[in-house]
Amino acid sequence: MTWDTVASILIGGALTGLVYSLMALGLSVIFGVIRVVNFAHGEMMTLAMFAGVFLFTGGGLDPILSLPIVAGTLFILGYALQRRLVEPFIARPEHEQFILLLAVAILLVNGLLLAFGPDARSVTVDYAFDSFELGPIFIDKVKAYAAGVGVLVAAGLLMFFRYTRTGKAIRACSDNLMGAQVVGLNIRRLYALTFGLGVACVGAAGCLLSLLVDVTPMLGPELTLLAFVIVIIGGLGSMMGALLGGIVVGLSEALAGLLIVPSMKSMFSFGLLILILAFRPQGLFGKRT
Amino acid sequence: MSRKSRLSVSRPITRRSFSAGAAALAALAAGGSPLRRALAAKPVKLGCLAPLSGFFAREGQACKRGFDLAPAILADMGMPIEIMMGDTESNPDRARTAAEKLVNEGAEVLIGTFVSGETTAVAQVAEQRGVPHVINIAAAPKITEQGYKFVFRNFTTGPMLVINGFGLMKDLFKATGSTPKTAVFMHVNDTFGKAMGGGVKALFPKMNMPFEISTTIPYDPKAKDLSVEVAKAKATGADILMPVSHGADAIKLIREMVKQRWEPMGIMTPGSPGTYEAQFYKTLGKYSEFVIANVPWIDPKTDMSKTLLAAFAKEFPKESPELNVGFSFEACLIAADAYKRAGSGDPKALADALRATNITEHVMIGGPIQFNEKGQNVNIKSAALQNLDRKPTVVLPEASAEAKPVFPMPGWTDSRRA
């Protein structure tokens, strides 16, 4: 195999990994602050993917352009979900939170099945079949655009947490909840904002992923699992870990396909997960508790 | 001769008897419904299983269209049926549960499922519960190699598909005067794909093909993208691509080939779905053109096919009829025919009647529907379908051809794709 083929495969893996990163970022943000594991993560992403497909087929909107609409709508949904449904469960045992969010996931899957049926749907934009040619290397245009926008969204989120007062307040809740309460921060509002931001992140990732993957209502569990693999590899609760975990998974899948057998790509990322759990359970970038 | 023994003798459905039945029914319909109701026999309860949701939902829905059309057409032939639909959810465990449920609810014959893994599970249920199972679609050979007494398959096995497919490839090269030197073989790694892969591996050396298989690449049909797989295939520099795909993965495969500017002489499957379905044309547009699939297909020339195709066009004007529809309909026909001859829903009598099946007038290309001692119909033939003007067109065998084959395939930017 020639070097340009290897380079094309690795670049493609890294670009896919960047979109995965954005998907996992939402899960990590919610867990990092509220300490609730969103088991409806993949299903929310599927909802966003359907929204992207719907806006494309109905209104001709490229999913990259419809991203703010979908992310905004999912922010409101996440905010309301936290205030009305999740909040009473925060102090309850983890298994009750798990069942609650699993119920949300089941409702979402079946709602989507009722609304759209079981058929796979896809977005075929004008540039769906195009590639950038860098000499002998081909770079998938759709993946490049999706990854670029994914990086921008992730950077925006990181800057929000680092430089804004609200972002700092959310981080304070994450670092020391009692201290945050003592200084008078509105925890309920900040939790709802965090949940909203996490779900908005999922919305953005869903729009981008609809450019790469055909969507069916049954896709949710698979995406939830993928997001868990990424955040566990990167470090649960670590935003930087989620970002790098996505790239590690994208690259490892590409390498597995290249070096071993393509049909064993998924096995490779699960193998990586087992290794991380065995030798570095806090993840590559997580903090040991 | 007793009534039972007389009924157990196979009476083939011929063109003449089909036409006579249709004419009689038209007369009955004109004569008024009370008379028709009085003559109507008790319908046989068919537990039809298909992946209506999940990964294979698209194909499962196509099977359901065949099941949906069967009651009216078969009732017109004096063979009333009642469809009890079950969703396998693209999952063998769910398929098993759904089959059990249908049997518990009174299904007299099980039909299904499309996916080999699921079909294996349903066949086990059928055998354990002693309920006849007519397989509409599933190619894994082992299903009919278990010595089952209640399982009958009206579909080709993987090796049969491969033999028919390779035969048609040789015919294609001869007809077009272009012969490739090398091929890359890509197949899904599920039960069906592995059966096909095993078939190709075992039969290719014996088929005296004019090209060599330079590499074999198995892939996950649920992979989110196939960029790595296609890059590896492209790197071999093979003249043709032989994919064994399902549905969504066939689209991903072609999309990736276009993106990576890989233009082999041809893309031709030795016998798998995915490239002749409505979604393939809709998603890929001009890039769907000239792909060839060597698969069993609806024979457009029989009276029963004409009836089925007319009913399909009326009921599903936005869909295109394909083999999933035809084989699903035929499975209902086989079960209804056996029930009529058995004279009861007794499972053993039904299984005996199924074993004695001899239906000469049917829907799919091939000889009469008959089952060998393993419960396998060995008379099914394939056709070479090439995508021309966004529809599957029979280009071989010559006797059934609707157009001449185009090979080598024009490049992705060729004006003939417009």
Image (cartoon, helix red, strand yellow):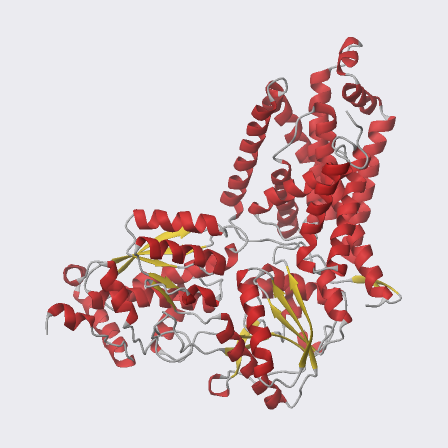
In depth, the one of A247 and B125 nearer the eye is B125
Is residue A188 visible in the rendered image? The answer is yes
A46 is higher (above) or lower (below) than A138: above
Indicate left or right for B166 with A268 as reference.
left
Outermost residue, top side: A182
B100 is higher (above) or lower (below) than B179: above
Outermost residue, right side: A135
In depth, the one of A11 and B287 nearer the eye is A11
Is residue B389 visible in the rendered image? The answer is no
In depth, the one of A7 and A105 nearer the eye is A7
Outermost residue, left side: B1
Indicate left or right for B109 with A16 as reference.
left
Q: Position of residue B302 (x, y in %)?
A: 37, 79
Q: Quadrant of the N terminus of chain A?
A: bottom right
Q: Position of residue A156 (x, y in %)?
A: 83, 36
Q: How many marks?
A: 0
B147 is higher (above) or lower (below) than B45: below
Q: Position of residue A34 (x, y in %)?
A: 70, 23
Q: Quadrant of the C terminus of chain A?
A: top right
Q: Position of residue A258 (x, y in %)?
A: 76, 60
Indicate left or right for B68 with A134 as reference.
left
| Residue positioned 62% across, 88% down in the render | B176
